[in-house]
């Protein structure tokens, strides 16, 4: 009876994958018990590419997940941004296996965000897009073009051979300034 109980225990452990057993013709049973580790997951190599993005543009978050156990298992982790949970990441890994997982994040506001996943942390900077005021830029370009055109056309050119470039330019600006003043005085009358 005792032999049967030992045999049943060994068979149960064998079915669970924890025992390697052999049986000899001399009615002796030899069992070698090896304990296998359950599925355990480690997280490493957290990266965010690029580390700076514009508002509304995605950044790719990647990390490596490794099953350090002997048995296959399902991993599950929930990334967080500044403590707020994102969608859970889960999958299946064989014993000793590893995988690289990636997901996208994007934000509606500028700032620096701290992403935490599997005990790892990395920061992401989100910048507001630069605002160009095109009407002002175009106005400046047109004004510069007009000023250069008037200067090259000869306004303010008295005896150019006697005046240096700087003196001609200053003379031109002075005449242009007086024309604008006259125009402003005419409008106020």
Image (spheres, rainbow, N blue to C red):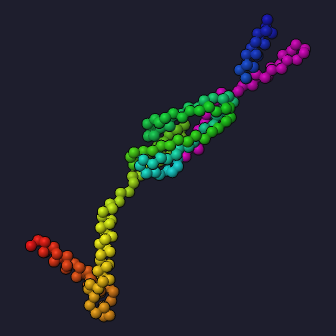
From the viewer's side, name the closer residue of 45 and 134. 134
Quarter of the view holding residue 118: top right
Outermost residue, left side? 189
Can residue 7 be seen here? yes
Quarter holding residue 140: bottom left
- Specify whether residue 125 is in view: no
Q: Is residue 169 magenta?
A: no
Of residue 83 and residue 93, the one placed in the foreground of this image is: 93
Seen in the picture, residue 146 relative to 158 is either above or below; the reply is above
Q: Does 169 sit left or right of 18 as displayed? A: left
> Residue at 44% across / 40% down in the picture?
82
Q: Position of residue 23 (x, y in %)?
A: 85, 17
Indicate the quadrant containing the N terminus: top left, top right, bottom left or bottom right. Answer: top right
Q: Position of residue 124 (x, y in %)?
A: 47, 47
Residue 180 lies, in percent from the top left, at 20, 76
Q: What span is in magenta?
A: 19-47
Q: Is residue 178 left or right of residue 21?
A: left
Q: Quadrant of the C terminus?
A: bottom left
Where residue 88 appears, as percent x and y from the top left, is 51, 33
Up the image or down, 163 lies above or below 116; here it is below
Question: What residue sits 29% from the left and 72% below the top?
Answer: 143
Residue 44 magenta: yes
């Amino acid at each position: 009876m005792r032999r049967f109980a030992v045999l049943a225990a060994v068979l149960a452990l064998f079915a669970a994958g924890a025992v390697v057993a052999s049986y000899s013709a001399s009615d002796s049973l030899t069992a070698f018990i090896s304990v296998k580790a359950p599925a355990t997951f480690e997280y490493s190599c957290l990266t965010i590419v690029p580390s700076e993005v514009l508002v509304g543009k995605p950044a790719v978050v990647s990390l490596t997940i490794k099953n350090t156990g002997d048995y296959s298992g399902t991993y599950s982790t929930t990334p967080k941004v500044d403590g707020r949970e994102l969608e859970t990441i889960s999958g299946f890994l064989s014993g000793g296996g590893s995988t690289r997982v990636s997901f996208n994040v994007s934000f509606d506001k500028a700032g620096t965000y701290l992403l935490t996943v599997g005990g790892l942390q990395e920061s992401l900077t989100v910048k507001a897009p630069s605002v160009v005021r095109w009407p002002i830029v175009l106005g400046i370009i047109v004004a510069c073009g007009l000023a250069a055109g008037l200067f090259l056309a000869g306004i303010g050119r008295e005896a150019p051979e006697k005046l240096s470039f700087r003196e001609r330019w200053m003379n031109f600006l002075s005449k242009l300034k007086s024309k604008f003043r006259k125009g402003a005085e005419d409008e106020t009358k």
